[in-house]
Image (spheres, rainbow, N blue to C red):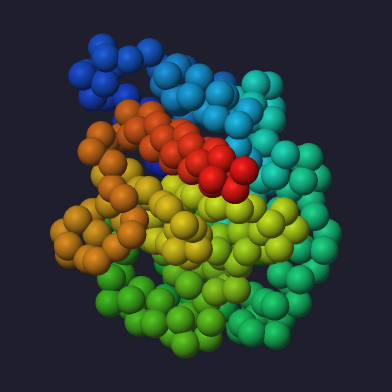
Amino acid sequence: MLFTCDLDETLIYGARFLQDENCLTKTKVRLIETKDGREISYMTEEAISRLKALSKKILFVPVTTRTIEQYKRITLFQKEIFPRYAIVSNGGTLLIGGKVDETWEALVKEKVRKNCLSYEEVLLKFKEIYSADWVVSQRRADDLFYYFIVRQDCLPKEKLDSFMDWLKENHWNAYLQRRKLYFIPSVINKGEAVEYLCDHISPDFITAAGDSLMDLPMLQKADYSITPLQGELGRLYQDEDKESKIKITSDTGILAAEEILKYIEDLNIALEKNWHQVAEETV
Ligand SMILES: [Mg+2]
């Protein structure tokens, strides 16, 4: 079984998710990422031990919009759990044993060149609405997409909406997630990266977890998928009561990670049982 799993706010959580006193008293939490001495991300001990056990039984693949550098900052995946494959940069990069898969890298660059407007043209157009009043910083991540740190309360909403529409027409996607604004070529997405990986490893069964619209292409490719209640997808599917095969957790925040891992564990147990049954029937 393959388990493709988003990291931030699906499996790992920032400090703002620790403010819930209930959560802190109910559970033990461990710091799993620091940056320049600052504490960045946490998981519960329970989630860590579930993930450890699960990683021995199934193929766990982290799938994240983090850059290579940001992914490698997570000490848990450098010291305790060693995923053979990791998809980073929102699907733009596949790491195998920590090294960039150059075949996928070349394929991605070719797809962007053929299908999407150039990086330079996108930036040029963005400069028409850009202002230091609301853009704090700008970065071209792993040479694959742009992201900006923005002041949410100063966004020029109408101008930004029409810029996002323009991006879509030119085969780019835009995502606004709190302080982060992303512009990503549409061919760079988690779904296409998982598909490429699957072509190589041919999993019998695919499961997925993720919280945001960036995870949707990956969740749609899975046989079973789950999303945390507090996330963008959780809210979307709950509010609109959409017909969906995506399961929503009942727990929220850092505790939702435990529920997600339990769900995948149970699926794996059920699947193995099924195989045994089929094997017995065949005998
Ligand atoms: Mg996420």
Residue at the front extreme, as displayed: 283
Residue 16 x %, y %: 32, 31
Question: 29 above or below 35?
Answer: above
Q: Residue at x 79, y 51 (%)?
A: 100
Can you see residue 13? no
Judge by depth and name the residue closer to the eye, 26 or 112: 26
In the rendered image, residue 220, in percent from the top left (x then y), is placed at 44, 64
From the viewer's perspective, is residue 159 above or below residue 75?
Answer: below
Q: Quadrant of residue 280?
A: top right
Left or right: 233 with respect to 145? Answer: left
In this view of the protein, which residue sits in the foreground, 247 or 151? 247
Whether residue 60 is situated above or below residue 161 in the rendered picture? above
178 left or right, relative to 149: left
Vertical placement of residue 81 versus 199, above or below: above
- What residue is drawn where x is 60% and y is 37%? 58
Name the residue located 64 percent from the left edge and 75 percent from the top edge: 119
> x and y percent of residue 6 in the render?
50, 46
Q: Residue 10: x, y in percent?
A: 41, 41
The number of numbered discs placed on residues in the rendered structure image is 0
Left-right relation of 98 to 157: right
Residue nearest the observer in this picture, 4 or 33: 4
**Most extreme residue toward the right, as rendered?**
102
Asked if residue 249 can be seen in this view, the reply is: yes
Assign the N terminus to one quadrant of the image: top right
Q: In the picture, residue 160 is in which quadrant? A: bottom left
Q: Quadrant of the C terminus?
A: top right
